[in-house]
Image (spheres, coloured by chain):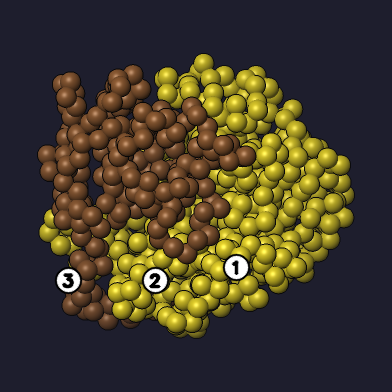
Chain colours: A brown, B yellow
Amino acid sequence: MEPFKTLTSIVAPLDRTNVDTDQIIPKQFLKRIERTGYGDFLFFDWRQTPEGKPVPEFVLNDPRYKDAKILVAGKNFGCGSSREHAAWALSDFGFRVVIAPTFADIFFSNAGKNGIVLARLSESEVDTLLRNAQTIPGYKLTVSLEDQTVTDDRGFKATFEVDPFRKYCLLEGLDDIGLTLRHAAELDRYESQHDHATWLRAK
Amino acid sequence: MSITPKTLFEKVWEQHVVVEPKGEPTLLYIDLQLVHEVTSPQAFEGLRLAGRKVRRPDRTIATVDHNVPTTIEGRLNIVDQIAAKQISTLRQNCADFGVELYDVNSREQGIVHVIGPELGITKPGMTIVCGDSHTSTHGAFGALAFGIGTSEVEHVLATQTLPQSKPQTFRISVEGKLPQGVTAKDIILAIIGKIGTDGATGCVIEYAGSAIRSLSMEGRMTVCNMSIEAGARAGLIAPDETTFAYLKGRRFSPQGAAWDKAVEEWSKLPTDPGAKFDRELTIDAATLVPYVSWGTSPGMVAPVTSSVPDPAAAANELDRKSFERALEYMALKPGTPLDKIAVDRVFIGSCTNGRIEDLRAAAKIAAGHKVSTHVHAMVVPGSQQVKAQAEREGLDQIFKEAGFDWREPGCSMCLGMNPDILSPGERCASTSNRNFEGRQGRGGRTHLVSPEMAAAAAIAGHFVDIRNWEVREEVKA
């Protein structure tokens, strides 16, 4: 996983609430067995007409936001299906940060595993950022994970909460299995006891 | 000595703490991982690349459900080569890593959340995960069950644990007697409509109250299944005599003395009197009615007797835009009575409503009637065992005589990853769990309802208030 420290980028405004993972990556692309190459399918049904023509008014087809690595969206972003393909698609497309008032739990976890920083800001802060990104040409934000801040060069500054351990993993780009295996001895001990609970056995 | 009263969730959580490293999430032991073809290939590949094994094959079960066609011919020769490869990849992975697979031809194949309980693999007090958000279904047994992403699937395969931050607790009590015609599906649709699709984010819901206790296991599974649609991490219900009666004698349920010991242990799980929840909500069952979803988010639901609401009622600008977009996608105008909306397709099935009791309920409505000439209606049993049971009871005959299409088990049209999809513009009364844009096929329009409401819509050709339905023939179980 690529470590994340700080990022300054163009901001793509997605002014929709409850953006579900079925929209982020539609089901037909979930049949692949690879982990890479999902960027082309990001928001597929919103980016393209059924005939395969780009939908010009969709934000990711707007040349102004071509190099955006930060996405701003409405509340409950990433709701619905647990598909990690949603995080893979966002990351593969080039997004490193999503800013929204709230995120769905499973998506929140999946994003972290893929080095995507999710910044929860208030609804009014998100409204401001959506408006700025829509109206100010070349609008950029700087996201610092170290300082837990989102800033622009016009005086906007907001802070976001992040669990200290999640922050550490994102900053260092750490893989979870390796971290868990530091506790191998405790795990062995727990498991040998726990296996006696016959009423909790699968088979 | 005073003992702090604990919630069901806290008891299950505490029994599964492996270690609580300072400043890090708790390492939680996972009793059971369920695996399916869609969210597992990259996880097994990750194990291979790192030279790791599946730590506990005996705590891992796999089946195929999302991609499998629901016709016999379709299953014999899966035309979609990418889907076929995903299924054969699971076969290979299960063989390589020693995981038991309930394959397409198995008499026990089915939707992962249907077969876990019916085989007695799901048990009270367990921690259960699956790379599928509807894993919350298993919470009906008093298990802590939640959906995870593929990286976490790999983590559990490798370590049988997951690092987890402790969620908040939220008790939703549904008190009183459910009115006639109001089902478990209506309970959960009402809850989501009330608290919103992010109403329980960060929480584990415990469903309680006399209306919940009076539900069968199938009904409880329907309620817990859609916890995720309210944003919850998981939903659970305290195990009781109904739970034990369901589990007794199932293939992987404990037997003999081990059964008695299990019931003794499981009986300790219910929330202690006086235990504190972070949040509480009480709903009067008598106020519930049959619901229909009208929009593209499961929170967009209304009583069948009401009309499509007006976006002007939205709380703010962003909500109003989403609201308008939903109505545009659904091709609905504010003020249209819901029971005037005509349907083209009907889907009865899924991990929400594809169990035997759901099929019995739908058959009772369908018996002696005919599906409307302009509707294509399909019934897809949740598993081979559900299908066999329904056929023993003659439900398949009732459906066929009424003009329903009786199919093979799988996820089918819940998510359109197999040949069962809506065509653009088609409108569907569906017993599934999500009405997202394109969920059942690009441009398809989904209305979520109970199995009874879906069956009635198939016959009438439009939504009807099931409370006024004429039941023509008695169905003998």
Q: Are marks 1 and 3 on the same chain?
A: no
User: Which is closer to the viewer, label 1 or label 3?
Assistant: 1
User: Element type at marker 1?
Assistant: helix
| Left or right for A157, reference B196 | left
- Image x and y of residue B244, in percent: 51, 67
| Left or right for A101, reference B311 | left
Against B179, is B334 above or below? above
**Extreme-top residue of the structure:** B312
Residue in front for this viewpoint, B349 or B324 = B324
Q: Which quarter of the picture shows residue B202?
A: top left
Name the residue beneath numbered marker 1: B84
Q: Residue under mark 3: which chain is it in?
A: A
Can the viewer see residue B36? yes
User: Which is closer to the viewer, label 2 or label 3?
Assistant: 2
Q: Are marks 2 and 3 in contact (CB under 8 Å)?
A: no
* Picture residue at 87% right of the left edge, 55% below the top: B401
User: Element type at marker 2?
Assistant: helix
User: Element type at marker 3?
Assistant: helix
Residue in front for this viewpoint, A71 or B294 = A71
* Picture residue at 53% right of the left edge, 76% below the top: B91
- Mark pair 1, 3: CA separation: 38 Å
Q: Residue under mark 1: which chain is it in?
A: B
Q: Are marks 2 and 3 on the same chain?
A: no
Name the residue beneath numbered marker 3: A182
Name the residue beneath numbered marker 2: B45
